[in-house]
Image (cartoon, coloured by chain):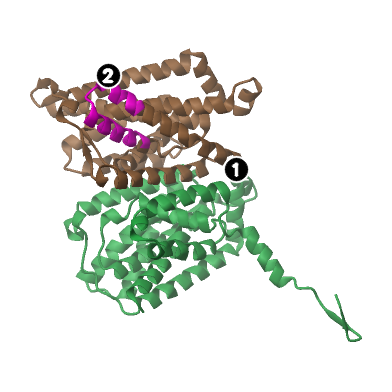
Amino acid sequence: MSPVIYYFLSFTAINILMCWAFYLPYRVGQLHHLVVSCMMASAYFSGYAARQWSWPFALTLLVGTAIGMLICLLPSFAIGDAPCFTVVIVGLTVLFIMKTAIENTRALGGTLGFFGIPQVNNLLLLAYLCLAVAGLLIYRIDNSRLGRAASMVFVDRDAASALGVDVKRLGMLFQIIAGGLAGLAGSLYAFLIGSLFPEFFNLGVIGTLMCMLFAGGHSTMWGVVISVPVFEGLHLILPTAVASWLQVIYAVTLIVVILVLPGGLITKKMLVKVGERFRARPQTVSIKGGIKE
Amino acid sequence: MEIFVAQLLNGLSLGSIYVLLVLGFNLMLVVAKIIQFAYPHLVVLSMYVCWGMLKYTNNMFLVVLASIVSCVIVNVAIEPIFRALSKKHGLDINVSFVVSISIALLITDVMSHALNYGFPIAFPTDWVGKSVLNFGLITFSVGQAYALIGGIAAVALFFYLLYRTRQGRVFRALSENSVLASIIGIPVVKTRILSYAIAGLLGGVTAVLFARLLGSASPSLGDFVAMKVVAVSILAGLGNLKGGLVCGLLLGIAESLAMGYLPGSWSNAIAFMMILIIMLIKPEGLFGIQI
């Protein structure tokens, strides 16, 4: 496999994981930017553990996921049911604090970056295995009572609360799972790239992920499965001069999508219609050689 | 003690800039019901305009005018996007937040590609000015004096406009109830556009004062200031103008004190840590939400 295709497929898997990490809390109306901090912390931890302590890949992946969940767990006690803008600012604030801490820590390379993370065999396969497991988990959540409760909270938080939905616990649960997904993505990212720079984890990454989520469709988990490869593919298709303006393209796309297609490309309504078409085929009964509906 | 006084003066100058930014941000929030995350980015863009203008002319009046006009034009040009958004989604603050983040990204990327080849800009040393006060460790530069005095004057004018004029009453009526305001004959769209224009005017003035205070700017400055402005607004209580005044000043002072007593970039992290702790304890803000 050519390196271009390899990196395209690997980044697609990592970005889908990150978009799902954004998607889950947005089911209850929260833009949980804290997941980028989880990705950052997990990436640095995995890189450090693999290089300095020679930890095996599977163990760093597990601990990285746990770190992501832990980072989201602590603030979730306060912001489990907080308004969207508070959650956004908490996320951005933690990201900035974490970046400052890493930039000032010599053991993690500071502003110069952290290098020498060992390569892992079959990383692509493992990444897609992780993606499949995460996808299955989110699919199960979406089609469970939790998913239905989240849809209710998204539409009307007060009504959901009146009907007995514990909005805070639901928000906390989704935030923690999102942290785990971001932690997983962070660990995979560290092993894929082999070097880490604090500058990478900025508002641009958040904008890119939001663009992928909103363009694909924020009401279903399948939207990002289509939008992420398309946006990742832009790197490869566009000429270098245009590709350097990719952030502008993402930003304009996000604005246009929200104005023109508020639900994104794939909406829940669309999926329900497609499902009905496949499920409810007309029953046919044979009468004397002819066909009657 | 001298360090404390010096940093206190520094903090007051910085705080008055934050106050101006928070006021412009809150005006659009209460009147147009949008979270304009990109507002500080516009201010940084106006700083670039100032810098560009300074290259061609040393006329202070023209520099200030260019800064104000650019900020007003870009801010008013953004308004139709948010109007279309509110028609499509109703007054959804969260969606406006997402759109304004993308506008912020757009402005930052344009600055980092097209202006000064993405390099930070530095204003001439005489622009920042010599110190007007020297007492031991305490120095008070012309830039700091401009920021403090200009900030106080702009805030006083803003509050006069809001609480002592007919237009101010219109703004306040629209923030209280836009439906009732339109029933009694207030032109809602025109008033919203005017709020963008006034916020742009404040932004233009802030850009000049900020440029004189800092003496430099970079594309990433917008992200950095935007986080603080939105955080201060939430900390004060979204839409709470008086709360924003107090919290903006407090953040400026706290940041400057941290800068005086802590090494390097940790001072900013400490300021953010304070914001984070207060936000986690009191997510609805210290002075209550007023939207």
In the picture as drawn, the residue positioned furthest to the bottom comes out as: A289
Can you name the residue that lies furthest to the right here? Answer: A288
Give the percent coordinates (x, y) of residue A213.
Answer: 49, 57
Residue B145, x across and y down, in percent: 22, 21
> Is residue B63 part of the magenta span, yes or no?
yes
Spatial CA distance of label 2 from label 1 is 43 Å
Q: Name the secondary structure under disc 1.
A: helix
Write down which chain is painted green.
A
Q: Give the label, 2 or 1, closer to the camera.
A: 1
Residue identifier under label 1: B88
Asked if residue A165 lies left or right of residue B276, the reply is right
Q: Colour of chain B?
A: brown
Q: Position of residue B240 (x, y in %)?
A: 45, 28
Vertical placement of residue A16 versus B114, above or below: below
Q: Chain of mark 1?
A: B
Q: Is residue A71 visible?
A: no
Quadrant showing the N terminus of chain B: top left
Q: Which residues fall within the magenta stretch?
A: B42-68
Question: Which amino acid is tagged 1?
Answer: Lys
* Residue at point 39%, 43% (across, down): B104
